[in-house]
Image (cartoon, helix red, strand yellow):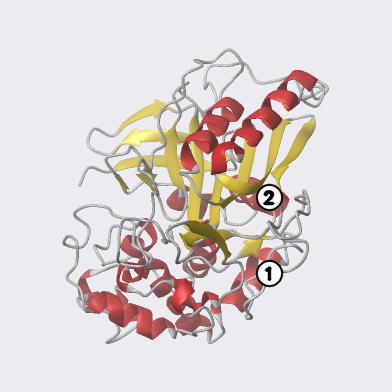
Amino acid sequence: MEKKRWAAAAGVCAVALAAGGVLVASPWSSDAHAPAPEASSPPPDPPRISDERRLALQRALNETVAGGSASGAVAEYVEHNEGGSDSWTGVAGVADLASKDPVDPQAHFRVASISKPFVAATVLQLVEEERIRLDDTMEDLLPGLVDGGDRITLRMVLSHTSGLYSYNKAMPSVRSDPGRSWRPEELVEIANEHDPVFAPGTDVEYSNTNYVLAALVIEAVTGNPYRDEVRARILDPLELADTSIPTDTGVPAPSMHGYAWVSDGAGGRTAEDVTAFDTSRWYGTAQVVSTVSDINTYWRALLDGEVLGEDMLEEMLTVQAYNTGDYGYALGPRSYTLSCGTQVWMHPGNIPGHRTWTVHSEDRDLTVFQARYREDPDPPAWAMIEMAMCPEGAPSEPSPSPTPGDYPSEDVTGTGRGKDGGK
């Protein structure tokens, strides 16, 4: 498994090729030869997002709803410099197909697997406190729970290099019993019933089983529910008042509903509301509810060194492996290089009715929530990501999404890739 490493400190990172040990400047790196600014130099004027760019962002968001890709969408885009920041928030479509209510800019939404970087940062705080180590095995941390756990380290779990089968591929659809509560140990047992997809540490493949284990590690070390640790360590200190890990089936108001496109029994299809369900089926992997503003706030704080110390942030942003789509899997966040050459840290999310993206560069943040509906929601969303995150004047043809396919997620129903999945 080829390993490429990214070093990061307070939002500035560099890439080193592990094989050769050669340090190469990344798009986030400062020019080491640039003269230091004079101490008395005033800060630059804050960025200003032009009216033309705001219109382009809104048009791009509208496209994520047009043609049935989603019933509704909300996005927040932020530009930063040393003088301050400027933001744009847009909505499109409706929040509820029944009422036709418009989408609220601060709509709460199931962020799906954007939940994972919250869990990863909580685990890494425990590593920082020397209560656990990244090279501890699952057998060390959770004795007897994981088949082959003596060869799977915490680092492998956080970076999806464990080889563990993603349990949700063998689960019934959420629609079959939305109120069913699952114990996390049940989810791990489903994974244990299937062979690993590769030997630990030899490849990379996304598996929700990894973050069920990460949540259980938090609980084993602290003696507290993982959601309480996430709140105490991350949500409360950063004042993310609109972010929660609910214990009931609902979503706080205002909300944007999610829908599944299902058979109506008469040869056609209809939209079925799948907003409310017991999220324990995604224990530790996809339970967070948040807003686009809170998600952007969290990632900016994370990359600016407000959540982890410098050394641990560098550890978090060390890419362990690249998949065939050129995603770099670090310890929670993922690295990707856009068609214009801009390197971003990001994470997608995908559960029934809910598609989410959060993408961040040195000076830009973008989070998009889509209430996925009849068609593949990814192409218009990825076009918006490329347009927003690339400098003006960059190539007009966006690169394909790094998660290609009609519905790029693990399957939950067992009847076909991703049509009712979670990623």
Q: Position of residue 81 (x, y in %)?
A: 72, 29
Residue where numbered disc 1 is placed: 251
Depicted 37 relative to depicted 309: above or below? above
Measure the alpha-carbon separation of dots 2 and 1. 15 Å
Q: Amino acid at mark 1?
A: Val
Does 328 sit left or right of 110 as displayed?
left
Q: Position of residue 34 (x, y in %)?
A: 58, 16
Residue under the point 22% across and 42% down = 2
Depicted 52 relative to depicted 10: above or below? above
Q: Nearer the viewer, residue 265 or 140?
A: 265
Depicted 212 relative to depicted 74: above or below? below
| Residues marked 2 and 1 touching at CB (< 8 Å) | no
Q: Position of residue 309 (x, y in %)?
A: 57, 55
Residue 192 position by quadrant: bottom left
Residue where numbered disc 2 is placed: 292
Q: Amino acid at mark 2?
A: Val
Residue under the point 49% across and 15% down = 395
Residue under the point 47% across and 71% down = 130
Residue 417 position by quadrant: bottom left
Q: Position of residue 325 (x, y in %)?
A: 32, 39
Comes first in the chain, label 2 or label 1: 1
Label 1 secondary element: loop
Label 2 secondary element: helix
